[in-house]
Image: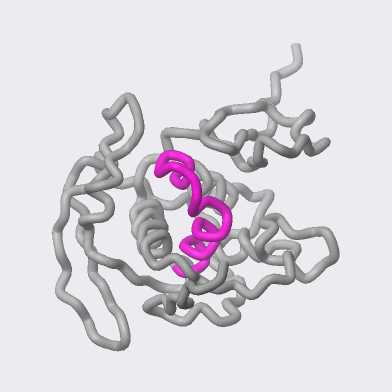
């Protein structure tokens, strides 16, 4: 789009190499409606931790409160946060808040699975060095990864922070795959559909039934 100034994020992403991380499930914390502390660090200066009310109440039957999310302080983080924020921006910034959370769940479900790399950066960059092997299309579409929408970047950054801090994954029933509605990949026929959220359909591998 023309006439839009490129937004520079608080931390330069650059070329982030996949990190080797111990394979252990990401901790699940207390109820998501509790206050969430943010210890922000940007440009080498430590900003005092702030306690804010989480926008995500797992007891809500429908949707999430975007206004509360936008009122939270701006966040920053380490390489894992950067990788998840980047993926949410390019894969789901136009989605509803629920849809963005669902995409984050898939990435973290893969981190917890022994079938995928054990870090967020590893999951997102998997296959990006091989032709037609990318797991996330933005990693090999040949386009420069520029963040042009400041508000969208800050919002997905907050979602990434909450998910990495252990927000319970309630939306996709353990999904490790998703695709948009306008495609019909052959691999989807081999998986179990778990959710239909926004423009994406979500899947996981079928549960094995014990033989008698």
Please report the bounds of the magenta region as a residue range.
82-101
x and y, in percent, of residue 202 in the image: 61, 35
**Which residue sits at x=75%, y=16%?**
211
Quick one: 32 or 69, which is closer to the camera?
69
Quadrant of the rendered image containing residue 63: top left
Q: Residue 165: tell me if it is visible.
A: no
| Residue 181 in the figure: left or right of residue 9 | right
Q: Is residue 177 above or below residue 21?
A: above
Q: Residue furthest top?
A: 212
Q: Residue at x 32, y 86 (%)?
A: 43
Q: Classify 5 as above or below 194.
A: below
Is most of the magenta stretch helix, strand or loop? helix
Residue 117, image x, y percentages: 64, 59
- Where is residue 92? Give x, y as percent: 53, 51
Q: In which quadrant of the rendered image does the N terminus lie?
A: bottom right
Residue closest to the far front: 3
């Amino acid at each position: 789009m023309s006439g839009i100034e490129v937004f520079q994020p608080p931390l330069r992403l650059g070329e982030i190499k996949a990190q080797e991380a111990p394979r252990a499930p990401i901790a699940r914390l207390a109820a998501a409606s509790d206050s969430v502390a943010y210890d922000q660090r940007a440009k080498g200066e430590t900003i005092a931790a702030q306690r804010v009310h989480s926008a995500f109440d797992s007891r809500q039957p429908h949707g999430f409160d975007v206004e509360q999310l936008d009122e939270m302080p701006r966040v920053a983080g380490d390489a894992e946060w950067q990788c998840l924020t980047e993926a949410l921006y390019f894969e789901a910034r136009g989605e509803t808040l629920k849809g963005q959370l669902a995409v984050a769940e898939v990435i973290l479900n893969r981190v917890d699975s022994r079938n995928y790399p054990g870090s967020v950066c590893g999951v997102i960059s998997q296959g990006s060095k091989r032709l037609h092997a990318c797991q996330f299309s933005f990693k090999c579409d040949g386009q420069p990864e520029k963040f042009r929408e400041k508000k969208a970047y800050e919002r997905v950054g907050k979602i990434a922070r909450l998910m990495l801090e252990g927000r319970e994954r309630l939306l996709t029933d353990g999904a490790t795959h998703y695709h948009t509605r306008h495609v019909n990949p052959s691999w989807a026929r081999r998986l179990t559909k778990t959710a239909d959220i926004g423009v994406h359909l979500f899947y996981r591998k079928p549960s094995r039934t014990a033989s008698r």
